[in-house]
Image (cartoon, rainbow, N blue to C red):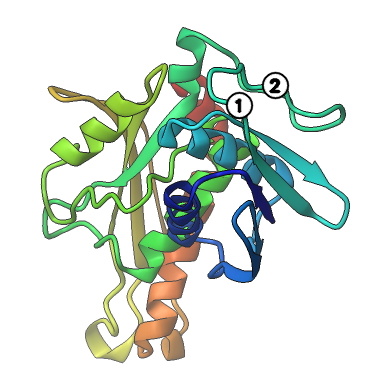
Amino acid sequence: MTIENFDARVVSAIERFLASFRRGEAAMRVRADSRVVELEYRFGAGSERLYRNFRLMLGQLGDAGTVEFGPGNKFYLVAADKGAAVPPPPSGGPSPAPSGAKIATKRLLVVVDDADRTSTHASNRSMRMLLDAVSTGLTERSFEVISPMGVDVGTRVKQPTKAALEVTAAIPGGARILLVKLTGDGKRLGPGGAASPLVARAVLRLADATDAVLVWEGSADAQLEHSCARDANCLVDAHGRLARSILASGWAHIAAKLK
């Protein structure tokens, strides 16, 4: 990745933004001077998703510029002259997002709804597996998933928090908040030493400062192997896989409700 003509403040903010991606590795500087900074950065998603995220990032930073994708899977972020309009993406590149009110409906800040003690905590691996599936599914259906830099929207607190609301309010054109909740679990062993069923329930809701509206919910159970029921890591992974399978069956309904 090459970053050209941005001041040091913006370059540092871009590096923090890259570090905030759940599926990305740490960015490493390979060259830097007063005008150009080159970074090596690996990310587990396609170029179109990165393109959208970089365009959104520049908007959040308040700096006009272009995002281009070139040979060798290389991105170029180039600062525009102050006051100049941001040019359209290069020929053959990803299409720009729709404008006006439609943008707000397509932009989503995904927040874990883990306020009560029956829900899976945001740091739990099964929840992270579900969040990755939610973000990937939204991106594949042309939604923009917002990944704000250095913003802590809180855990084990009622959502959306003030921080979450401020993030969406600060985005030009607006955005919506999607709450993700995961409950259910499997006991290590049931009566008589037999493995009890693993249970998962996932819920998605759209929220604002005063209300939250149900988008979709689904649940399922699965029988655990005896060895998995005795292994905490296996149990967590099985819970995450079950949650993802529930989500996969609901995407047609979810996408329709979010439009």
Q: Nearer the viewer, residue 84 or 126?
A: 84
Label 1 belongs to which residue? 81
The image quadrant of residue 37 is bottom right
Label 2 belongs to which residue? 87
Identify which residue is drawn at 58% across, 34% down.
55
Under circle 2, the secondary element is loop
Looking at the rendered image, the disc whose residue lies closer to the viewer, 2 or 1, is 1
Identify which residue is drawn at 66% across, 39% down.
78
Q: Position of residue 214 (x, y in %)?
A: 29, 28
Q: CA distance from mark 2 to mark 1?
A: 11 Å
Q: Is residue 161 above or below residue 118?
A: above
Please rate how many residues cluster around mark 1, counting C-alpha atoms within 10 Å: few if below 14, some from 14 to 19, many from 20: few
For residue 128, side relative to residue 177 (left or right): right
Q: Is any part of residue 128 visible from this angle?
A: yes
For residue 97, side relative to residue 94 (left or right): left
**Which of pointers 2 and 1 lies earlier in the amino acid sequence?**
1
Residue at far top of view: 100
Q: Position of residue 129 (x, y in %)?
A: 46, 61
Q: Position of residue 101 (x, y in %)?
A: 45, 9
Q: Position of residue 158 (x, y in %)?
A: 11, 43
Rendered-image quadrant of the N terminus: bottom right
